[in-house]
Amino acid sequence: MTASIPGATTLEALSAWDTVRELAHARGDDEVRVVAALAGARLALEAEDYARCGALLDELRRALDGEAQAPAQGASAHEPPRLRRPRLLDVQYRLVACLYQFQVGDAKLAKETLKQAHALLDAVPAAGAGLGGGEGAEGGEVTVRRSSLSISQFCACSS
């Protein structure tokens, strides 16, 4: 996945990815929305827009954890479901989150996030599948559980 648009400034590219994310949300295309949020987070990190990067990483975490869908009214709140997705997406999410955490001064959390990325890279993929680069029908999907603490919540707690 390339997060750059030839000839565009970083702000123009961020705006373009925001548009892609909004269109995907309007159409209910969660896969495209997640990829656009990851691309936007990478660009926001590059632009040193840490507030925007943190917000996009929170959105990404909620989408990947299945928290974006609130329980129906009257339904009891329960643990977010585990979702299956390409392992490479999880690795990229964790690497961007790690860089963000380091930049905002949380080296301990960044180190833990990097360990999680390494664990995903070392995990045995599903039979006949690779890292999600087109090998196998499942694209190397694995199930991963994350902390329910968002990056914004963590930053608010640690300050």
Image (cartoon, rainbow, N blue to C red):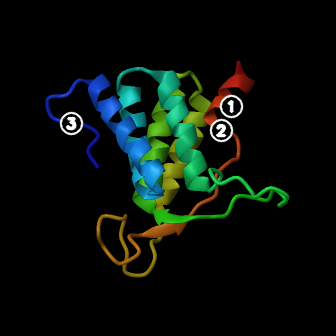
Q: Which mark is residue 5?
A: 3
Q: Earlier in the sequence, mark 3 or mark 1?
A: 3
Q: Position of residue 92 (x, y in %)?
A: 42, 48
Q: Nearer the viewer, residue 106 or 136?
A: 136
Circles 1, 2 touching at the beta carbon (< 8 Å): yes
Q: Quarter of the image holding residue 111?
A: top right
Q: Horizontally, is 12 left or right of 29 in the view?
A: left
Residue 74 is at least partly visible in this image: yes
Residue under the image location 70 percent in, 24 percent down? 156
Residue under the image location 35 percent in, 26 percent down? 46
* Residue bearing mark 2: 150
User: Dot 2: what SS?
Assistant: loop
Pair 2/3: label in front: 3
* Residue bearing mark 1: 154
Q: Which mark is residue 65?
A: none
Q: Position of residue 58 (x, y in %)?
A: 58, 39
Q: Horizontally, is 76 left or right of 118 in the view?
A: right
